[in-house]
Structure formats: structure tokens, C-alpha cells
Image (cartoon, rainbow, N blue to C red):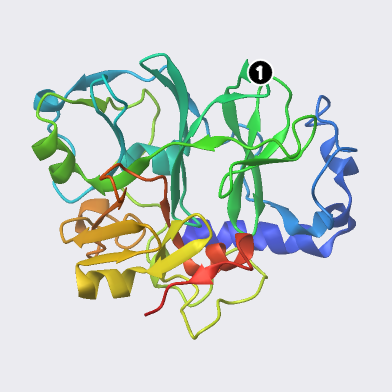
Amino acid sequence: MRRLAATLATAVVLLSGPAAANPEIWRNEWPDTDFSTTAIDDWREILSGGPPKDGIPAIDDPSFIAVSEESRIAEREPVMTVEIDGQTPRAYPIRYLTWHEIVNDTVGGVPVAVTFCPLCNTGMVFDRRAAGRVLDFGVSGKLRNSDMIMYDRQTESWWQQAVGEGIVGELTGTELTQLPAWMESWEAFRTRNPNGLVMDQPAFPRSYGANPYVGYDGSSRPFLYSGETPPHGIEPLARVVRVGARAWPLTRLSEAGAITEAGVTITWEAGQASALDTREIAAGREVGNIRVKDASGRDVAHDIMFAFAFHAFHPDGTWMLR
């Protein structure tokens, strides 16, 4: 929480200055970014999250070990799961993504970016192929509506993680393809995939397994966010399952266990800890495991984001309340 308070103080200083409304101050740090091409109408929407460009280091060419060899991850800890047909399933632990936010990997010839923004709880996996090239992503250190702004190393364009779209630079307006992937507990992954692979611990001096955002998902307001609160009396940091431009409150899903609506079936099962609650991720409060499938039983691209983020990035979206 001390770290979050320091970050918030930094953002307040930046927001109050002229730099917030003008990208000129960023040109020294981003000499290869085309700031004249952008989808941003008001530069005050973009704030520094505290760390500079690559201050949160993305992981490239991650190492993996067999599920049977992993002993550090607790049963309830969340992982991002990537299962591509014909390939060994892979788990990317949130204990690592919390500190690195992006993993650039290739699975069966498919270049993927496994991403997680703690401030919005958005865990999303994208195909890194766009605009006729394979992109490598890093963490810009900038935020918009509390969501991570990624950048690609090929053109230094900026990308909004929550929607997978270029917002500044040469690739403005280009959309990444979100792949069907999901967040689940380590126990759920290893039970289903005893012969699967799990990302090995990166060689960085980080407190892996610890949550640097203690108590964040119990806050009344998100940090570094000045936008509207969600409608219908929904708490800003309540989790929702987003499929396209629809959002199902997690509370509704946990009560029902399974819901079939709008062409998808969403199921909820207990067993996953929040990564943004207690200091030790494994001890976090129950948030449950979500799966989203279509009428043919195929996994559907989705994410589990905070309600304020859904409202910010999908202002005309549909709230699936009852």
C-alpha cells in the first residue's frame, strides 16, 4: 500500500502540470514514437504510473518446467492458462505477471503476449502478429484509466492493454487478436494438465508470491483513475466477466454457478485466490475459477476486469445483471 500511495502522489503531481496535456515532454524518452498519429483526444488521460519505460521489465523467451517439478506455487494461486490445439498447455503464474505484466512467448508457432494489469485486473492473451509483422511488447510505464499502456519494440507505438488496440504512433487503430485464454487456480490447471508446462521463476530480484498491491481490490476507488464510476450501483472494484462488450458481475456468477446467455455459457467454481488482496497471494480471498464457452463447447476469449475499467473502455457496453 505504501508503494501505491507513492505512485498516486507521483500521478497527482503529473496531472497538475502542463505535461499531462502535451506529449512533448515524452519525446526524449520516446524519440521513435509518432505522437502526431493518435486516437487520444485529451493527453491528460495518460499518466505516469511511476516506473519509467521498461521499469517494469517484460519477460522474453520464458523458461518452462514440467507441472510435476513445480513446488513453489500454492494450490489457490492464480495462473493464466494458454491451451492451443496440438500444443502442451502452459501456465503463466500471476505471481510473476504481477511484477512483469507482459510475457512474450511463442506457442506452437503462434507468437503470444500474455499480459496482466494489476490495477484493472485485466489478464489477456494476444496474438503478437499485427500489421504484417510479429511484434514484441514492453511496459511503457504509462497508464490510461488505470490500465497499462504497452508499447511494441518494432514501431514504439503505444497500445491499450484492456482493448488490445494501438492508441499512439504508427500502429494507431490496429487491433490485436485476443486469444481464448483464462485465469484459474494452479490446482485447477495441474489437475487438468498433469503433463503440462508452467513458466519457471524469472531471474529477477523480486518477491515472487507476494502482492505489492495489498488490499487494492477492497478499495472504494481505483488508483490513478478520475473517470466515472460504474452504473447500477456496482462498486468500482467489483469484478466482472467481460465477453465482447458485455459484462457479467462475478457476484451473480458465484451465486448461480453457471449462466447461459448471449450465446455463451459461463461457469464459476470455488478455489482461486485474489491476487490483489492479502500480502501473500495464496491467502487472498475467494474469487473463484471462471470458464467461458460457446454453444459448441469451445473456449471464448474474455477477461475478468474491475467494473470501473469495463465502464471506462466499454461506455456503451451491456451490463448483464439479471
Residue type at mark 1?
Gly
Circle 1 packing at 10 Å, graded few (<14), some (14-19), many (20+), is few
Residue 179: image quadrant is: top left
- Which residue sits at x=38%, y=39%? 180
Q: Is residue 141 above or below residue 258?
A: above
Q: Is residue 274 visible?
A: no
Q: Is residue 9 above or below residue 194?
A: below
Residue 234 spot, x, y in % from top left: 46, 80
Residue 276 spot, x, y in % from top left: 36, 58
Question: Is label 1 in a helix, a strand or a loop?
Answer: loop
Residue 265 relative to residue 53: left or right: left
Total marks shown come to 1
Q: Is residue 73 above or below residue 60?
A: below
Of 307 and 316, nearer the camera is 316
- Which residue sits at x=43%, y=73%? 320
Q: Residue furthest top?
A: 109
Residue 105 relative to residue 195: left or right: right
Residue 294 spot, x, y in % from top left: 33, 49
Q: Which residue is mark 1?
A: 132
Q: Residue furthest bottom?
A: 233
Q: Classify the position of the N terminus by image quarter.
A: bottom left
Of 94 and 235, nearer the camera is 235
Q: Classify the position of the C terminus by image quarter.
A: bottom left
Residue 209: image quadrant is: top left
Of 50 and 90, nearer the camera is 90
Residue 220 spot, x, y in % from top left: 48, 78
- Which residue sits at x=21%, y=20%? 65
Q: Is residue 6 visible?
A: yes
Residue 146: image quadrant is: bottom right
